[in-house]
Image: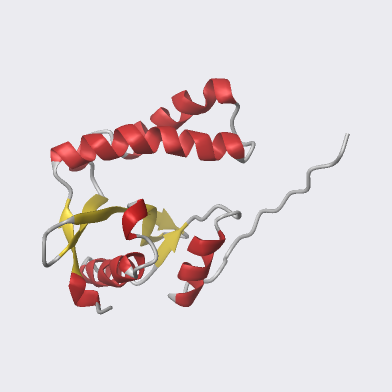
């Protein structure tokens, strides 16, 4: 599958509303599952983080939200969101989210989206892309490693039996 089969199209308002309504809840569940947040506080904390990053919705400064669409039919296969972060006094792109719809997974669309992302990030003048991946997400970690991403910080824990 070549990179030419998909386009990153700036997200429209309707897709943005759908995306955020689903993703805030999913983000909360991930952090609850990983023990970072309690079930009682999860949704509120997730909403606060999204609001901090996207205070003006799609018009939020230094935030780039895209629909991933097949070129042929303009069919949406997923989303990609990255923003600009400052690390060590240098600006870089940071992937906040990528999602490929269930029925389109394992067909190379995520890989194509990351290759298209590299072009967008390079055009903005950045030379580094960062991201976070949950440790249990082995498929995503394998994809990122295949694309040349390397771990820069690993946090580990061990649950002790009571």
Q: Residue furthest left?
A: 73
Compared across the picture, whether 44 is left or right of 120 comes to: right
Judge whether 149 appears above or below 101 on screen. below
The reply, left or right, for residue 22 in relation to residue 120 is right
Tell which residue pokes out farthest to the top in this image.
40
Q: Is residue 127 left or right of residue 44?
A: left
The answer to whether any part of residue 88 appears in the image is yes
Where residue 151 appears, as percent x and y from the top left, is 57, 67
> Going 29% across and 66% down the picture, which residue do you hit?
113
Q: Residue pushed farthest front? A: 103
What is the quadrant of residue 98 in the picture? bottom left
In the image, residue 109 lies at what x, y percent?
A: 31, 66
118 sits to left or right of 152: left
In the rendered image, which quarter is residue 75 located in?
A: bottom left
Is residue 100 at least partly visible in the picture?
Answer: no
Display colour scheme: secondary structure
Q: Position of residue 42 (x, y in %)?
A: 51, 28
Residue nearest the observer in this picture, 94 or 107: 107
x, y percentage for residue 64? 24, 52
Q: In the displayed structure, would residue 49 be above or below residue 137? A: above
Residue at position x 25%, y 79% in the image = 2
- Give me the residue at 43% from left, 62% from top: 130
Residue at point 28%, 54% (across, down): 78
Q: Which image quarter holds the C terminus?
A: top right
Return the residue nearer the eye: 40 or 78. Answer: 78
């Amino acid at each position: 599958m070549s990179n030419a089969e998909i386009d990153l199209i700036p997200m429209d308002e309707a897709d943005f509303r759908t995306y955020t309504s689903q993703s805030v809840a999913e983000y909360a569940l991930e952090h609850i599952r990983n023990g970072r947040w309690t079930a009682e506080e999860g949704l509120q904390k997730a909403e606060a983080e999204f609001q901090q990053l996207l205070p003006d919705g799609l018009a939020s400064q230094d935030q780039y939200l895209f629909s991933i669409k097949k070129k042929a039919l303009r069919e949406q296969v997923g989303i990609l969101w990255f923003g600009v972060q400052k690390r060590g006094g240098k600006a870089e792109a940071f992937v906040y989210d990528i999602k490929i719809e269930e029925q389109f997974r394992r067909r190379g669309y995520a890989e194509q989206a990351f290759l298209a992302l590299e072009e967008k990030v390079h055009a903005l003048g950045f030379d580094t892309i960062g991201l976070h991946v949950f440790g249990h997400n082995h498929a995503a970690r394998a994809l990122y490693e295949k694309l040349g991403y390397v771990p820069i910080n690993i946090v580990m824990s061990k649950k002790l039996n009571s």
